[in-house]
Image (cartoon, helix red, strand yellow):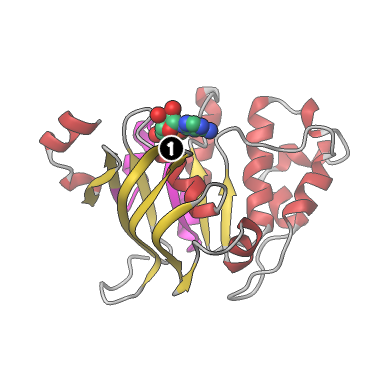
Amino acid sequence: MKLPPEEAALLEVRSLQAGYGPVQVLRGVHLQLRAGELLLVLGRNGSGRSTLLKALMGLIPATGRASLAGQELLDLPAHRRARLGLGYVPEQREIFPRLSVRQNLLLGAKPSRTGPSRWNEAAVLALFPALAPRLHAPAQSLSGGEQQMLAIARALMGNPDLLLLDEPTEGLAPRRVAATARLIRQLQEQGLGALMVEQKPWARELADRVIVLGDGLTQFEGPPAELPPDVSAAWL
Ligand SMILES: Nc1ncnc2c1ncn2[C@@H]1O[C@H](COP(=O)(O)OP(=O)(O)O)[C@@H](O)[C@H]1O
Ligand SMILES: [Mg+2]
């Protein structure tokens, strides 16, 4: 699955700056992610990991450069970025509580831009069988673990080339954490790239590479095994 080094980046981010009104959180983030790669975003709480995903998805304004498969992203609204192949699983899951599970799934549905569309309702239900008997239930009646499955399933329904995953196992019971780790590995083996924020140890075991955010900058980018102790001590 590892691609040769000459393979062009799927996602390329340079000098990315973003924040909230006068508060600048990201001052110059860079990263590269090749197709199929799992890139883990590390940093302390408040270091801007969620801000990075929101800026890439187009939910907050950002300046600098960010491109997906050579297409500039930063000038585009979020729905156009989704059409280009970005899928987003937000930290708060943000499902529509009064809509049914099926309606939530359909809201995420779109064909792949770059190849055959692997994901549809049947395919996501095969991945998350627990959702099948709940298809017509309002999403707010799902357990926390099921809502997390729905958030991932909804993102997959968009047949993304790259998933932005924000702490996908936050608040889950240990059994669900392990199941989610297996799921993400499975998606990775199927060639789906991901930019993931996750603090738990399984994430470093799975990651092809990591970036460390600190002081609004990329402090390290490389394989997890090469993370220097002084970078960990200073920024993690
Ligand atoms: N909506 C917001 N308005 C103002 N400040 C925010 C908002 N969201 C996050 N922040 C601030 O931006 C910084 C980075 O937050 P965030 O990206 O959520 O960090 P992380 O995900 O790494 O924990 C924090 O100081 C946080 O308080
Ligand atoms: Mg966060």
In magenta stretch: residue 196: yes
Q: Is residue 85 left or right of residue 104?
A: left
Q: Is residue 28 left or right of residue 148?
A: left
Name the residue at 40% across, 39% down: 49
Q: Which residues are magenta?
A: 185-210
- Residue 131 on image: x %, y %: 75, 39
Q: Which residue is mark 1?
A: 22
Q: How many numbered circles are shown? A: 1
Name the residue at 27% across, 77% down: 6
Q: Which class describes the residues within 10 Å of circle 1: few (<14), some (14-19), or many (20+)?
A: few
Q: In the picture shown, does residue 8 fall above or below 154?
A: below
Q: Secondary structure at mark 1?
A: loop
- Residue 166 on image: x %, y %: 50, 40
Q: Quadrant of residue 219?
A: top left
* Residue 21 can be seen in this image: yes
- Residue 41 on image: x %, y %: 36, 43
Kind of residue sitting beneath label 1: Pro
Task: Residue lying at the far front in this picture: please name it.
Answer: 22
Q: Is mark 1 within 8 Å of ligand 1?
A: no
Locate the N terminus and report the quarter of the image it occupies.
bottom left
Q: Is residue 198 left or right of residue 152?
A: left
